[in-house]
Image (cartoon, rainbow, N blue to C red):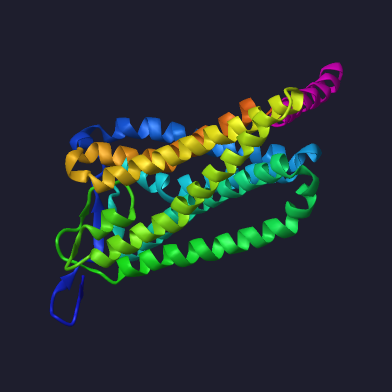
Amino acid sequence: MQENPAGNISLTDFIFIGFPALYEYRRILSIPFFIMFVVAIVGNSVIIYTIRTGASLHSPMYILICALAIVDMTLPFVFIPKMLLSFLFDWNEISLKGCLVQMFFFHFFSSFESTILLIMALDRYVAICNPLRYNDYINMTTFHKMFVAALIRVTFLISLIVILAGSLFFCLSNVIEHCFCEHMALVVLACGNTAKNSIVGLLVIFFIPGLDLLFIFFSYCKIFSAVFKAAAGKSRQKAIHTCGTHLIVIVVSYTFALCSFLVYRFRHSVTPDVHVLMSVMYGIFPSCFHPVVYGVRTKEIRDQILKTVKGSKTKVISMTIPSITQ
C-alpha cells in the first residue's frame, strides 16, 4: 500500500476473480481457453512461417497478413498464461505496476491490430480502384511510414490512458472482477473522480478503432462499387473472394470489440460472468479465427502450406528408406 498526501491509503496489490459465479469450476474453464491459446499460437505460427518461406507470398497483401498473424500470436501471451495460472493454481495476485504493464500491452496490441486491418483495406482499395498506380502507392517505403505513424499514434494514446490509470488512488477494493487488467476493470476500483479516465478512454476508442473502422467502411464502399461496375470474369470473382476474406476478418474483430465495449457501458445490465467472457473472447477468439480463415480461403497460402507438408513428408521418407536398406 502507499499513502497519498491527504492521508488516504492506496492499494498496490490486486486479486483477480474472473467468472465469480463459476469460481469453483475454474479448472474446467481453463481447458477451452488453453485449447484456444494453442490454436492461436500454432495457427499464426503456421501462417508466419508459410509467408516467410514462400517466395511467391512476399507481396504487400501477404506481408500485411503476416503482420496481422504476428500481432494475433503476441496478444494472447499478454494475458492468457496469467489467466490459466490463476484458474489452475489460484495465483490470482498482481501488483499495480504489473497490472499497468499488462493493461498497456493488451490495449497496444489490440489497437495495433485495428491499424493493420485499416492498412489492409487501403491496400485492397489501391489494388482494385487504382491498379496502375499500385506499385507507386503500395511499397515497403509506404509500409514503413504507415507502421511508424501507427506505432506513434497507438503508443501515445495507450500510454495516456495507462498513465492516467496509474495516477489514481485505489481505496474501494483490491478485487478485480476480471481475468486480466483491462482499463475500466481497474479504473472502477478507484476512489475519487474518474471522469477524465472515462473521457480519455472514449477518445482513444474514437481515435483508434473508431476512425479505423470509418476509413475501412469508406474504402470497401469504393472497392465494391468499382468491382460491381467492372465486367464479370475471373478477375472480378477473385477480387470479391479476396475482399470477402478480409471482410470476414474485419467483421469478427470489430464485432467482439464492439460487444466488449457495450458490455462495459451497460455493465449493470449484464452479469459479471458475461462481461468477463466477452472481454476474454475479444482478446483470444480473433487470434484463433484469423489464421483459419486465411489458411482455408486464401488459395496461395493454402497451396504453400500443402506444399510444405508434402515436402516434409518426402524428406521423412527419403531419410527412412536408407536406414531400412541398411
- Give the x, y percent position of residue 253: 47, 40
- Give the x, y percent position of residue 211: 48, 53
Looking at the rendered image, the quarter that the N terminus falls into is bottom left
- Give the x, y percent position of residue 293: 57, 30
Who's the residue at 83% across and 19% down the image? 321
Q: Image quarter for residue 90?
A: top left
Residue farthest toward the bottom in the current orientation of the protein: 5
Who's the residue at 34% across and 57% down the image? 202
43 vs 267, left or right, is right
Q: Nearer the viewer, residue 233 or 83?
A: 233
Asked if residue 256 can be seen in this view, the reply is yes
The range drawn in magenta is: 300-326
Q: Nearer the viewer, residue 199 or 169?
A: 199
112 in magenta? no
198 vs 132, left or right, is left
179 vs 322, left or right, is left
Who's the residue at 53% across and 32% down the image? 248
Q: Nearer the viewer, residue 130 or 91?
A: 130
- Give the x, y percent position of residue 245: 59, 31
Q: How many marks?
A: 0
Looking at the rendered image, the quarter that the C terminus falls into is top right
